[in-house]
């Protein structure tokens, strides 16, 4: 691998409530997943985040989630109908897409947030619902999918452009999914540890689980969560490690980062 994308979830502040260090992160990452008003974000924040990304040449994408400001989109909503999820995602794509159009800076990708992503990673119907929303809104958008999950398989089944993602700041369970945030060791806060893990996974083309098991996957992009207290330091350290290994860090493009 000679190039990879580095992405971050951001634009998740709303009103007087602040989340993350977006200004600093935008100077490091190459793609921004911007909240669309359901789990975080508001019109002013969306405009500000897209405008700043445009100034810095950072690719922008939509980060839709469940309508759950109170729980930051991380509470599972069981029993949601796939058709309703599809419509919910289209609504959010329309919101951020309108902002991007007004600013003359196109959306490049879509990445589900929080509980929606976790559900879609394991549930084919939900992953397809998100994919159908992307296809209905703009089939040229990249489906940013957690590597080796139903998200990746849904993108392939629907013929959507695809970028496969691993996480710098999350541990993996033995089946290759993210370890629940409720379990010890699920969140990684040490920047050097995160950089070592990312470089190992990218070099080996595999997700490394908590036990050290390797699960082969294609990797196009690396995520550092914006709400991690160590996010800025971690993103900088991960980028430094990748570039130090001769891997160019560049925005994702259709079909592959």
Image: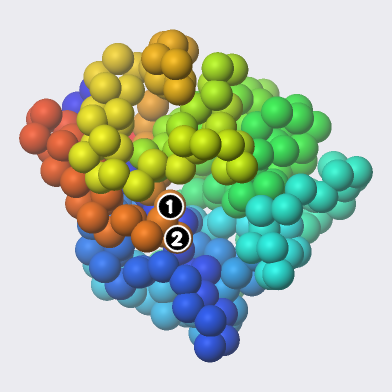
Query: Which mark, residue 17?
Result: none
Local crowd size for mark 2, using a 10 Å CA cut-off: few (<14), some (14–19), many (≥20): some
Vertically, is 155 above or below 213? below
Q: Secondary structure at mark 2?
A: loop
Residue in the picture at 42% in, 73% down: 49
In the shown orientation, is residue 203 left or right of residue 125?
Answer: left
Residue in the picture at 23% in, 55% down: 233
Residue in the picture at 73% in, 53% down: 75
Q: Residue furthest front?
A: 184
How many tags in the picture?
2
The picture quadrant where one finds residue 190 is top left
Quadrant where the C terminus lies? top left
In the shown orientation, is residue 105 left or right of residue 243?
Answer: right
Inter-mark Cα distance, 2 to 1: 6 Å
Query: Is residue 176 shown to the viewer in this render?
Result: yes
Residue in the picture at 90% in, 43% down: 79
Which residue is tagged 1? Answer: 225
Quadrant where the N terminus lies? top left
Local crowd size for mark 1, using a 10 Å CA cut-off: few (<14), some (14–19), many (≥20): many
In the shown orientation, is residue 138 left or right of residue 1?
Answer: right
Q: Residue furthest bottom?
A: 16
In the shown orientation, is residue 242 left or right of residue 69?
Answer: left
Which residue is tagged 2? Answer: 227
Across and down, in percent, residue 19 comes to: 47, 71
Vertically, is 200 above or below 248? above
Q: Secondary structure at mark 1?
A: loop
Circle 2/circle 1 CB separation < 8 Å: yes
Across and down, in percent, residue 170 comes to: 45, 38
């Amino acid at each position: 691998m000679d190039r990879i994308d580095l992405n971050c979830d951001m634009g998740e502040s709303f009103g007087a409530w602040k989340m993350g260090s977006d200004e600093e992160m935008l100077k490091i990452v190459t793609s921004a997943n911007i909240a669309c008003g359901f789990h975080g974000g508001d019109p002013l924040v969306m405009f500000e985040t897209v405008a700043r990304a445009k100034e810095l040449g950072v690719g922008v994408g939509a980060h839709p989630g469940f309508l759950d400001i109170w729980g930051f989109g991380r509470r599972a909503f069981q029993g949601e109908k796939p058709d309703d999820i599809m419509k919910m995602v289209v609504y959010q794509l329309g919101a951020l897409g309108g902002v991007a159009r007004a600013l003359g800076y196109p959306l490049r990708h879509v990445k589900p947030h929080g509980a929606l992503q976790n559900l879609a990673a394991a549930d084919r119907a939900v992953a397809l619902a998100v994919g159908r929303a992307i296809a209905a809104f703009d089939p040229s958008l990249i489906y940013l999918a957690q590597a080796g999950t139903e998200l990746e398989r849904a993108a392939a089944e629907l013929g959507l452009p695809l970028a496969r993602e691993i996480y710098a700041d999350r541990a993996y369970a033995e089946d290759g999914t993210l370890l629940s945030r409720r379990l010890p060791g699920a969140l990684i806060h040490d920047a050097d540890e995160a950089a070592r893990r990312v470089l190992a996974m990218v070099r080996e083309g595999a997700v490394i689980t908590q036990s050290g098991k390797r699960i082969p996957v294609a990797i196009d992009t690396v995520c550092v969560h914006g709400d991690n207290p160590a996010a800025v330091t971690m993103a900088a350290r991960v980028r430094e490690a990748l570039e130090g290994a001769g891997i160019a860090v560049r925005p994702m493009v259709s079909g592959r980062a």
